[in-house]
Amino acid sequence: MTTTRGAVRGLRRGGVDTFLNIPYAAPPRGAGRFAPPLPHAPWDGVRDATVPGPNAPQAARTLGRVDMSPYFGAGWSRGADYLTVNVRAPAGAAGGGLPVMVFVHGGGFVAGSTRSALYDGSAFARGGVVLVTLNYRLGISGFLDIPGAPANRGLLDVVAALRWVRDDIAAFGGDPDRVTLFGQSAGATVVGGVLAAPEAAGLFRRAIVQSGSGLGAFTAEQAARVTRAAALHLGIEPHVDAFARMPDARLVEAASALAGTELRTATHHDPLLGLSPFSLVLDTQPAVSVAGGLGADVDLLVGTNAEEGNLYLVPVDAYATSTRADVEALAARAHPDPVRLVETYRRARPGAAHGELRSAIMGDALFGAGSHALADAHAGAAVPVGRRRGGTFRYEFAWRSPALGGELGAAHTVELPFVFGLTRLPALHGAHALLGPDGPPAGLATRVHETWVRFAATGDPGWDPYDSGRRATLRIDADWTQADDPRGEERRVWR
């Protein structure tokens, strides 16, 4: 296979052509770690694209009693040439004009990579899609707002990868005019940021935001706090020249030390509730930019899981032990009127235990409120003259994982194996694995996966569009049901 930078050699197995570790930008070395992504130099001969490459510098991550290794992968695989993509396509698809899906992984802006087992895109390729996964800069190199450096370098990497797709994906059988950008968690928040980025206009036709937030960006004041804390920890001046002299290992260690940095200000709460010191840094939240018309011509599918907050409570034994004080403290951290917030959730969930209330508020603070805001913004945006209006669709994934004694439930990340058609992956099964000891209902994974493929191919996932009146939402479980504005009272309290 020949790309604009050189030829690559992949693998053909089981009807799928796999190409790993293809560069879309130059290696971020030295000061280049804090610069916009640059074109990769051409190479001579044929580049071996049969083995995984390095990934972004990162610390190993665990999450209490649940095994998240399929999600986070094995950690940092060292090497500078990591701004790369993996491509999986139907065998012999060159010239096929197939729909393309480009995935942005999650991991709190500090972890994850294309090497993670959950991101094997073979099922997409078998379904007639060219699937692209990408690495991008993380942590300090990717998202610390540093004087003298461009902001949101990790997002700029994603835009550069989309430009690579535009220029090169036809060689793998993909249609550059039928690109769907999708992501989960931090990756979904990045997708929302790209949707609102003028420089990305025209690079993709559809977008899927899985458990992200259109209200998840930090203000400049919040970002400056993280930058000062990072510089203090490293003993350097808060300027790009000083950070550029730091080796990657020191930056990774410093990023880990920043966890828990207080980011509440007089005018803004911390949209990540202290779970990560990194996010996009924007003057205007993506949902606000989208409401102004950016991305209005892109078809958008946005959704969350029914019990997002469980992932952050159940594995660390904080769900069953939650108290009224825990619920009230979380509400105070997440909302300007915490008393009203708690009263609303108690009224909507009569008889709910403290753990359920804490999880529900946490999930909506992190993902739900920002996802609703993004859907509302997109559905109500004015479309520029002469451009098509993109459809808006909303879902809630509600299948409950029986992991951790049945408590994990429809937690954050549980939908990913269904989307990628990987629910049979052995590492996902067991008492402490993401999907628990038993398999999901027969056919559910196939239906979810095929729905994502259908949306990428047609822009219609198969249920009614979301608008500001009905707010039609599909609830995905063993049975699929559509409802108008479910959890409307809880949604409204965040507006």
Image: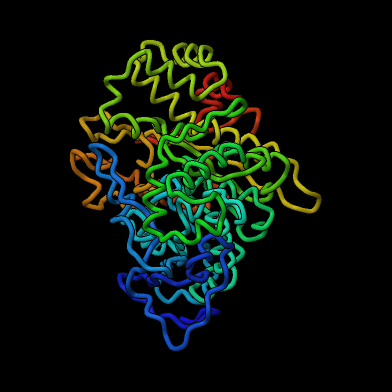
The colour mode here is rainbow
- 221 relative to 129 in the view: left or right: right
Occupied quadrant, residue 374: top right
Q: Is residue 441 visible?
A: no
Rendering coords of residue 443 (x, y %):
32, 45
Number of marks present in the image shown: 0
Q: Residue at x 67, y 58 (%)?
A: 199
Rendering coords of residue 133 (x, y %):
44, 61
Nearer the observer, 450 or 137: 137
- 436 relative to 294 in the view: left or right: left
Q: Residue furthest bottom?
A: 45
Quadrant, the C terminus: top right
Nearer the observer, 486 or 328: 328
Nearer the observer, 464 or 8: 8
Q: Residue at x 54, y 38 (%)?
A: 225
Q: Is residue 305 visible?
A: yes
Nearer the observer, 249 or 37: 249
Q: Residue at x 46, y 36 (%)?
A: 304
- 326 relative to 426 in the view: left or right: right
Residue 208 sits above or below residue 322 on the image: below
Rendering coords of residue 47 (x, y %):
41, 81
Q: Residue at x 49, y 11 (%)?
A: 343
Rendering coords of residue 105 (x, y %):
43, 52
